[in-house]
Each structure stands twice: as C-alpha cells, then as structure tokens.
Image: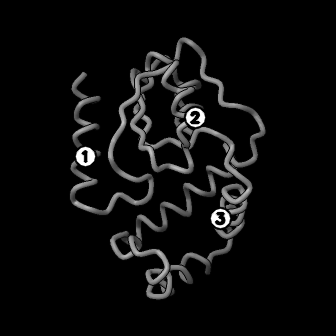
Amino acid sequence: MALRLIEEHDMIIENCLLLYPFLQRPSFKGRAILKSMHYLYNIPFIENLLLTGRPILEKVFKDLRHVTDEELRTSLTLAYHEHKMIGCSKEDLQISEQLREKLHMIYCDQDTWCPLHTVNKMKKWISCEKTNTTHGFITSTQERAIVLKSLQFWTNK
C-alpha cells in the first residue's frame, strides 16, 4: 500500500520507511489467510467474536496477550487491504527507479511474509537495515527498543 501511495503522491512524499514489508505475493497459506480476513472484515460480528474469544486465541498465539484490542482491529483492517492490494496480485514487485531513492527498509531474517530472497532483491534497489526481531507483533521491550533505534536512524538521515 505504501508503494502505491508513494507512486501516486511522488511529488509530496520525500521518504518512505518500509518496516517488515509484505512485498511479494504470499504463499497459498498466506493468500488463504488474507482472503479469509478480507471476507471476515465485512462481517460485523467477527471483530466482536475475535475480541471476546481472546482467552482461547491467546493460548494458541502467546504474543496476542500483549496486543491491544485496537491493534487487533487494525490488523483486520490491514489484512483486508493487503488482500486487495497484494493477495490478489500475480505480478512480481516492481519499483520504478525514481522511487527507489526515497525508500528505506527495515527487515529481519525470520520473516515469512518478506523472506530473505525478497530482501536480497530489494537490497539491489534500496537501502536496507537488518534487525534482530521477528515480523510478528513487536511485543517485548527489547524488540521495541531495536525497532525504535532503527526508526531513529532513518528519520535522522
């Protein structure tokens, strides 16, 4: 979505920092998750069901207990839009040369949404910084400090 915005508003966007970006068409499993979220997003009671079912979900997804209800709602909204923008796409990622200088990326090795082969492709085009975190919800104090340090580096450039 950020790449689409920067393409459409190139004249007013000076820089764009991609934090653990989802840059390629996902695997079948990833597409199924996004498609499910796309359809569930349009059913009003699903959000309430997820929020009231948190105790059960937290047993499966340990980090979920650190995620606020608002972050969970936002994740549903993002999945809906990610499906529309990326989940349906069958094309490889294309970034025009004039946009590459405006892009910076923070990535990690343990990311299934933006795997290492995609990162290596991106390194040829844009500046990238590796962090020692995971792509999932950044919940530990240590991971948050790592991400903030990376963000400060790029915003002070």
Q: Which residue sits at x=60%, y=22%?
A: 95
Q: Is residue 157 left or right of residue 39?
A: left
| Mark 2 neighbour density, 10 Å: few (under 14) some (14–19) many (20 or more) | some
Q: Residue 70: x percent and y percent?
A: 41, 67
Q: Residue 35: x percent and y percent?
A: 72, 60
The answer to whether residue 52 is above or below residue 39 is below
Q: Secondary structure at mark 2?
A: helix
Q: Amino acid at mark 2?
A: Thr
Separation of residues labelled 3 and 1 (CA atoms): 29 Å
Label 2 vs 1, first from the N-terminus: 2
Label 2 vs 3, first from the N-terminus: 3
Q: Amino acid at mark 3?
A: Met
Which residue is nearer to you in this view: 156 or 7? Answer: 156
| Mark 1 neighbour density, 10 Å: few (under 14) some (14–19) many (20 or more) | some
Question: Which residue is the site of mark 2?
Answer: 118
Label disc, if present, on residue 146 of the rendered structure = 1
Q: Secondary structure at mark 3?
A: helix
Q: Amino acid at mark 1?
A: Ile
Q: Residue 87: x percent and y percent?
A: 70, 49
Q: How is the image coloured?
A: one colour
Label disc, if present, on residue 49 of the rendered structure = none
Q: Secondary structure at mark 1?
A: helix
Q: Residue 25: x percent and y percent?
A: 69, 43
Question: Which residue is the site of mark 3?
Answer: 37
| Quadrant of the rendering where the N terminus is positioned | top right
Q: Which residue sits at x=33%, y=42%?
A: 131
Separation of residues labelled 2 and 3 (CA atoms): 24 Å
